[in-house]
Image: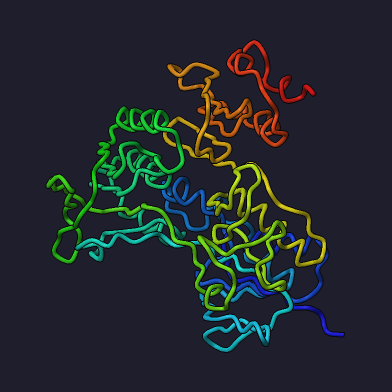
């Protein structure tokens, strides 16, 4: 009897983690990884941090495992190779040079940067930050004194702004909304980061929309909605991402904001799974179907999907967790609250060391930790258990959070 073939489309973090999980689960069949980049699987958080700062494509903070690992384990890497279609009837992934049959298929196709549909957006010097090559190329542009304009005040844009300032660049951030981090954080945190960046020499322009770019083949100015023209040597566009659902959609799988999966990562086809940025799952802690763009979700959802491919699946669902490092500030966030009855603070805002808890009907539905990483684990435990908490105890630093989380 021939051994099974598991194909993974996508050589990012989710795809790389799935390989490791299949091996640790004892899968002894054929594993094929198809990736459209030339690099072995890597993690993306370092792209706006260490790789951008140092320009090292083989940074240990990015690569998950060396190329030799995959060769030693007999894992077939089809890099710089794009899957063009899925033939569900014959269970084949169509590639440029033929195809690969599969018994189980994992789609870990991730997402791509959202483009700006404005005049001049195709000029040289207008860049995105999604791949290792993007990060290295952007690093080379960020020479001391370079004028860097960043369109988008989300995590990627702000982390890149912090890196650019540390390299001596002149940095301007344009955010179309009234607050930074508008999509993921409460307004008071957006204002905190606005103050942080301004204190470090970044020019922040909120409620400012880029409507065009000018230059002779290369970008030289960004035109804002108020008529202002900002000089630019390089422009980074960071206005969100689009999930790469085309393979799934064209194959007739259930697709919404992402590829719809169940708690095991299984799509509407029982032999096809999806994980990471491209997958959309029902999250009981958020209370709706969500597509999570985070390091932890890419890791844990792909672990669950890979185990399910082996027939040993366990349901995956957890309180969402995100983090960002900018200058000397670390922020970690739990949950995706869209509404709350009360918000209480533990710690000292003036010292930039505090946690904000968002409460609804006595339960913690979200939390933001600024330079207080120790609060993450006990808070997450209480959120998982849907614990009714006393707001006064949350704010009382004499009462340890771990004691609250441990109590019945």
Q: Nearer the viewer, residue 371 or 94?
A: 94
Q: Is residue 319 above or below residue 9?
A: above
Foreground pick, 388 / 203: 388
Q: Is residue 194 left or right of residue 64?
A: left
**Residue 284 place in picture, x, y as percent:** 66, 45
Q: Quadrant of the N terminus?
A: bottom right
Q: Residue at x 53, y 73 (%)?
A: 249
**Residue 201 versus residue 343 in the image, above or below:** below
The residue depicted at 78 percent of the width and 55 percent of the height is 314
Percent position of residue 163, x then y:
38, 42
Instruction: Decide: is 1 above or below 188.
Output: below
Residue sitting at 59 percent across and 76 percent down?
Answer: 78
Q: Quadrant of residue 264?
A: bottom right
> Which quarter of the figure is the C terminus placed in?
top right
Q: Which quadrant of the figure has residue 106?
A: bottom right
Q: Is residue 62 left or right of residue 317?
A: left
| Residue 159 x %, y % | 41, 42
Residue 34 appears at what percent x and percent y? 59, 74
Q: How many marks?
A: 0
Q: By what rule are the colours in the image chosen?
A: rainbow
Q: Nearer the viewer, residue 256 or 4?
A: 256
**Extreme-top residue of the structure:** 398
Residue 374 visible? no
Q: Is residue 380 left or right of residue 122?
A: right
Q: Is residue 168 visible?
A: yes
Name which residue lies at 78% across and 78% down: 4
Examine the rendered structure and indicate whether residue 86 appears above or below residue 285. below
The image quadrant of residue 318 is top right
- Hey, which residue is sitting farthest right in the picture? 1
**Apparent side of residue 192 relative to residue 396 in the rendered image (left or right):** left
């Amino acid at each position: 009897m021939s051994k099974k073939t598991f194909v993974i489309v996508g050589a990012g973090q989710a795809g790389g983690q799935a390989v490791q999980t299949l091996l640790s689960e004892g899968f002894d069949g054929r594993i094929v990884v198809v990736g459209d980049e030339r690099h072995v699987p890597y993690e993306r958080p370092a792209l706006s941090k260490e790789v951008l700062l140092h320009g090292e494509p083989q940074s240990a903070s990015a690569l998950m495992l060396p190329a030799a690992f995959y060769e030693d384990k007999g894992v077939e890497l089809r890099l710089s190779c794009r899957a063009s279609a899925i033939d569900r009837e014959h269970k084949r992934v169509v590639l440029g040079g033929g195809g690969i049959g599969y018994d189980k298929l994992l789609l870990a196709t991730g997402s791509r940067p959202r483009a700006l549909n404005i005049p001049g957006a195709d000029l040289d010097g207008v860049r995105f930050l999604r791949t290792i090559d993007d990060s290295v190329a952007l690093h080379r542009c960020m020479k001391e004194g370079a004028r860097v304009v960043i369109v988008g005040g989300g995590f990627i844009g702000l982390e890149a702004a912090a890196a650019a300032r540390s390299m001596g660049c002149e940095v301007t951030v344009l955010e179309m909304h009234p607050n930074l981090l508008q999509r993921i954080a409460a307004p008071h945190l957006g204002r905190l980061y606005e103050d942080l960046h301004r204190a470090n020499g970044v020019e922040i322009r909120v409620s400012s929309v880029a409507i065009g770019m000018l230059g002779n083949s290369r970008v030289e100015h960004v035109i804002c909605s108020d008529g202002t023209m900002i000089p630019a040597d390089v422009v980074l566009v960071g206005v969100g991402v689009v999930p790469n659902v085309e393979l799934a959609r064209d194959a007739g799988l259930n697709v919404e904001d992402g590829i719809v999966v169940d708690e095991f990562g299984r799509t509407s086809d029982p032999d096809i799974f999806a994980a990471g940025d491209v997958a959309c799952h029902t999250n009981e802690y958020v209370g709706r179907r969500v597509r999570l763009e985070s390091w932890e979700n890419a890791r844990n959802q792909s672990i669950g999907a890979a185990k399910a491919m082996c027939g040993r699946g366990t349901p995956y669902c957890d309180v969402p967790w995100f983090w960002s490092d900018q200058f000397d500030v670390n922020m970690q966030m739990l949950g995706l609250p869209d509404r709350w009855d009360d918000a209480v603070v533990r710690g000292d805002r003036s010292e930039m060391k505090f946690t904000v808890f968002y409460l609804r009907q006595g339960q913690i539905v979200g939390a933001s930790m600024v330079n207080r990483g120790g609060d993450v684990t006990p808070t997450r435990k209480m959120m998982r258990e849907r614990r009714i908490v006393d707001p006064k105890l949350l704010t009382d630093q004499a009462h340890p959070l771990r004691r609250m989380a441990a109590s019945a």
